[in-house]
Amino acid sequence: MHNNITMSENKLELKVIKDSDDSDIDLNNLSLDAAKSFLILFDSLTKIVELTPNNEGVTLQIISGSAVAVANGTASQIESVETCFDEIVNHVSTDKEIVSKWRAIQELVCKNGLQYEINIYKDSEKRPIFQTIKSAKQFRVKSNRIRPDITLKFLTGKLIEVGGKKPNIHLLDLDNNRFTINCDHANAKRANKYLYSDINVSVWFKNKEGSRAKYDFCDVYHSNEVYNDFSEFMIDYYNDFDEISALKKLHYKCKFFIDNNDFIHLNKFIRLFNHDANDLNELKTILVITKAFKEQEHIKLIRERIKFLFDQKLLIHHLNNLISF
Amino acid sequence: MITEKEIFENLLPLNSDGLPDSFVAASVKINEKGVAYHAGIVIKHGGISYLFHYTGEDVLIEESPNGDYYFHKDFIFIKGPITASFLAHCHLIKENAVPEYNYFYSGSYYDTNGRYFSNIDMPECMTCVGFCINVIKGYIEEDEYFQFSDWTKESAESVEFLNRHIQRLLVKHPTADVNLLIDNMRRICPDEYLASAFLYKLPITKTKVDQIIENIRMVLISKLN
């Protein structure tokens, strides 16, 4: 009976296998491209090890045959590296530095014409990750897009009451939930016309822990189509955790209205962002896309309000910086 | 008025340590004589630097670019936690660029006829500086960034820079009317563009740039070492 004592292999292995002309790689005889590529792999590997916690005892190796860079460790150390790698692939890592090392590897293997192999070994079981790296979207840190505690909500229901000393309107939705929505006098008077009718509204919703939900009126929609369109947009927009991607969506949405010469609906759309809850970047994105239309009759006023909000928030930001300095 | 020392302290290499986490900056690349010959915009957002520029061929957004010979100064008039919107602005321009033409961007997403910039089929020819100026102009709220009328055809310092660029354009468009090209060119040099980042008030006038340009040129040369 065999009595082999095989050491369990736990390692991350990066290999340059073939050069761009398909010739085999020989560590004793590297082309300039192969040498540069190998350097990047070895450098990235070293830094990944450095940035992985509990890395005492991890050793690095360069093996010839092809050009192989290896980091050897214990099962739990390699497990650490693998978990981190998977987080990066799934775009949930927030570790800037380690992401940039893996990105360097990704950029290298994607762009030049050499052939590589990248494997993780856990308890001697080989997991090839080259294809995963090559086909993944560019590795980047998860964008921390923090939603404010005030968000837009879209409500449909029957308007059952209007009034109060501090004006508000009361809506009963399809599930018989009652919403008390604060508004101003002008909007309360407008709403009065719809008493006992079904209406579609958007509201700003403040949900603070331990206190009652507070709703502030934003807008009313006569068209179900527009109401649904805006509502769907906001769901998609809120769920986009990549800040840049979300802002681009905002741009393209505004662009759609402008290209169709539909400044009336653009006005209604922009109103959704006329609130202090919106951040400077959102407000600025709207200002930039509408810059050429400052004087357009349907959006002039709402744009001025957005600009005012932007300037005010920016000023407060600068003042806060001065104070804390 | 800003001193040579202040310029020196604020004109930083691209990959300096200790830079703030987010900013938008004018950036130039210097040659072996310390003269700025290429312009770009550096955006730092979420801790990562991006170089946005027009190479004469392509519009590029380079992440963590190689910073050799690049120096930058953050714009005084673009400050605050707005780098996400500026970066989105760059991505949108790049996304909608018309690649087969010499890249143009008129400085606003929409021209005076309400046409989105990628739908315009008679592009104006542009230098790397012109591109940067238009990107900034499209972003700021003010109608003007550089007061172009201050820069005339006779701007002597720019001739070499202009000629080099015209030659490059003629390679791509051999039948182009050279006079038309010259007329349409923005005659602003990379170092004059860089100077604008040190100025507070818009529009940027030639008078204000001239007040600091010699110091800026001297500082760029000194940075070679």
Image: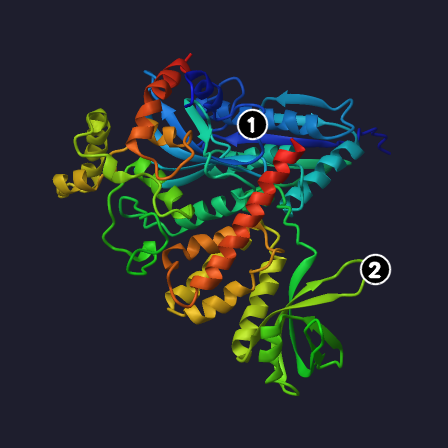
x, y (%) of residue A264?
44, 71
**Please, what secondary structure does the residue beneath circle 1 have?**
loop
Say few, some or many: other residues with alpha carbon within 10 Å of mark 1 (under 14 / 14 to 19 / 20 or more). few
Residue wearing tag 2: A210
x, y (%) of residue A74?
79, 30
Q: Is residue A86 or residue B70 the one in the foreground?
A: B70
Q: Quadrant of the C terminus of chain A?
A: top right
Q: Residue at x 39, y 67 (%)?
A: A297
Q: Is residue B193 or residue A126 the one in the foreground?
A: B193
Residue B225 sits in quarter: top left
Residue A173 sits in quarter: bottom right
Q: How many marks?
A: 2
Residue wearing tag 1: B19
Q: Residue at x 29, y 29 (%)?
A: B207
Looking at the image, the residue that sits furthest to the top is B225
Amino acid of disc 1? Leu
Q: Residue at x 67, y 54 (%)?
A: A148
User: Taking A300 as reference, is B115 left or right?
Assistant: left
Q: How far apart are the alpha carbons under marks 2 and 1?
A: 42 Å
B202 to B5, vertically: above or below: below
Amino acid of disc 2? Gly
